[in-house]
Amino acid sequence: MITIIYESKAGHTLKYVEMLSKKLNIPFYSSKEASKKLKSNDKIIYLGWICAGKIKGINKIQNKYTVICYGAVGAYPYSDKYINELKMANSIDKPLFYLRGGIDYSKLGRFSKLLVQMVGKTMKDIDEKTQIMFKQGYNFVAEENLEKMIQYIQKNSNNI
Ligand SMILES: Cc1cc2nc3c(=O)[nH]c(=O)nc-3n(C[C@H](O)[C@H](O)[C@H](O)COP(=O)(O)O)c2cc1C
């Protein structure tokens, strides 16, 4: 039995979690709920949102459960270089799948909003949709972004 554990602030990560759970027919818990429902060493898939290069909540689960793979949900455009940086910064030794979330300013507090807008202004060579995302918000969540992750999980776990 495999379970998804997640942390989401504005809902993009939760959306991916719901899609993954439906597709693989496995349950999901927030990291808070998981500590009550799961035993240490249970097999899990972890999804968390990225805040200043760190995958939120990852430190709470890394030495506790048997992690099959990770999903990191962020706003920046996809690149292999970025995924490698995330792996290093979060001490990840399992496959990491980058899932593009988005920005929803209505869900952010004043400080977070200012911070994200500031980052947007410093980013160079960004495409039009990314510019729109930083200016007014945009949602990149799409089921097809999960394809590689689903393939990996199906190939590497006998129980699904
Ligand atoms: C304070 C703050 C810092 C962020 N830092 C990053 C970052 O370093 N890299 C990135 O790709 N996205 C970053 N983001 C964007 C979020 O990861 C993105 O909005 C994500 O979709 C949030 O997921 P959630 O809706 O599940 O909370 C940041 C957002 C906030 C509010």
Image (spheres, helix red, strand yellow):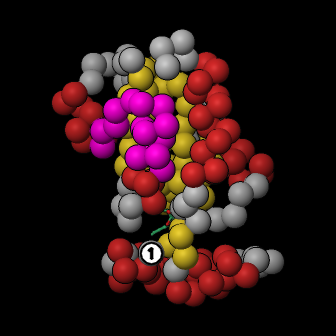
Residue 112 on the magenta segment:
no
Where is 97 relative to 13, above or below? above
**Residue beneath label 1, please?**
104
Where is 63 relative to 102, above or below? above
Q: Amino acid at mark 1?
A: Asp
Quick one: label 1, few (<14), some, or many (20+) residues within 10 Å? some
Range covered by the magenta-colored residues = 16-30
Q: Is residue 105 visible to the viewer in this orientation of the structure?
A: yes
Prevailing SS of the magenta stretch: helix
Q: Residue at image x 67%, y 76%?
A: 130
Is 115 or 103 nearer to us in this picture? Answer: 103
Is 92 or 141 nearer to us in this picture? Answer: 141
Q: Residue at image x 54%, y 12%?
A: 158
Q: Is label 1 within 8 A of ligand 1 (CB to nearest ligand atom)?
A: yes
Where is 151 relative to 17, above or below? above
- In the figure, is residue 102 to the left or right of 80? left
